[in-house]
Amino acid sequence: MIKKLLIVLGVLVVAIAAGVPGWFYLAHPKTRPAPDMEAQDSPSAVERGRYLAEAMTGCPACHSPIDESRPGDFPVADMLYAGRTFTGAFPGTIVAPNLTPDPETGIGAWTDGETCAPSARVSAATDARSSR
Ligand code: HEC
């Protein structure tokens, strides 16, 4: 009885060990290389980006450390976009990365195309859906 149980357990462990990476490989989102592009950096383009990020989509709420001394999710004023770590509400830790221009800890070393890669991923997924 114990031997049978161990065999079933062994088969399960092997199936999971092979199945999880296999499933991830088959199901991962479709991607394409980052586009070779140059983002506009005129003052009006930068101001529009700030408006979209801060007024429309709320990027700083997740990507900035929060001032714990105040009620509400107010970012620490001089740490905007420096990243935020979420603990407690979820199992494990979720990190919204540093989006500052720092080349080592932020996204300063990314090309303009890499910065836009998430939207490239979305368009790849949309292409895949619309070609079905
Ligand atoms: C609800 C919280 C939340 C909001 C709002 C949010 N993000 Fe994020 N963002 C995250 C988390 C969490 C990650 C890390 C995801 C991961 O590691 O898979 C992330 C990752 C990223 C990354 C890194 C992607 C990569 O491929 O490495 C970029 C760039 C980014 N966010 C930009 C933005 C921008 C720009 C906005 C506003 C338009 C935004 N985020 C709004 C939570 C958020």
Image: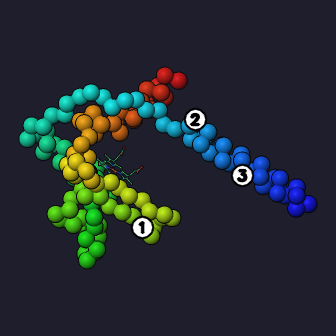
Q: Is residue 9 left or right of residue 86?
A: right
Task: Give the secondary structure at mark 2.
Answer: helix
Q: Quadrant of residue 108?
A: top left
Number of other residues with Cα within 10 Å of mark 3, as a class: few under 14, some 14 to 19, many 20 or more: few
In space, the residues marked 1 and 2 are separated at their CA atoms by 31 Å
Question: Between residues 121 and 93, which one lies in front from this camera angle?
Answer: 93
Q: Residue furthest bottom?
A: 69
Q: Residue furthest top?
A: 131
Number of other residues with Cα within 10 Å of mark 1, as a class: few under 14, some 14 to 19, many 20 or more: few
| Residue under numbered circle 3 | 13
Q: Is residue 101 left or right of residue 83?
A: left
Label pair 1/2, CB-CB below 8 angstroms: no
Q: Residue 36, position in %: x, y? A: 27, 27
Q: Amino acid at mark 3?
A: Val
Q: Residue 57, position in %: x, y? A: 28, 50
Label pair 3/1, CB-CB below 8 angstroms: no
Which of the two discs, 3 and 1, sits closer to the camera? 3
* Disc ID at residue 71: none
Task: Give the secondary structure at mark 3.
Answer: helix
Q: Is residue 80 left or right of residue 84?
A: left
| Residue under numbered circle 1 | 87
Q: Residue 121, position in %: x, y? A: 39, 35
Q: Residue 113, position in %: x, y? A: 27, 33
Question: Between residues 104 and 107, which one lies in front from this camera angle?
Answer: 104
Q: Earlier in the sequence, mark 1 or mark 2?
A: 2
Label pair 3/2, CB-CB below 8 angstroms: no
Picture layout, residue 84 above or below residue 101: below
| Residue under numbered circle 2 | 26
Which of the two discs, 3 and 2, sits closer to the camera? 3
In space, the residues marked 3 and 2 are separated at their CA atoms by 20 Å
Task: Give the secondary structure at mark 1.
Answer: loop
Q: Earlier in the sequence, mark 3 or mark 2?
A: 3
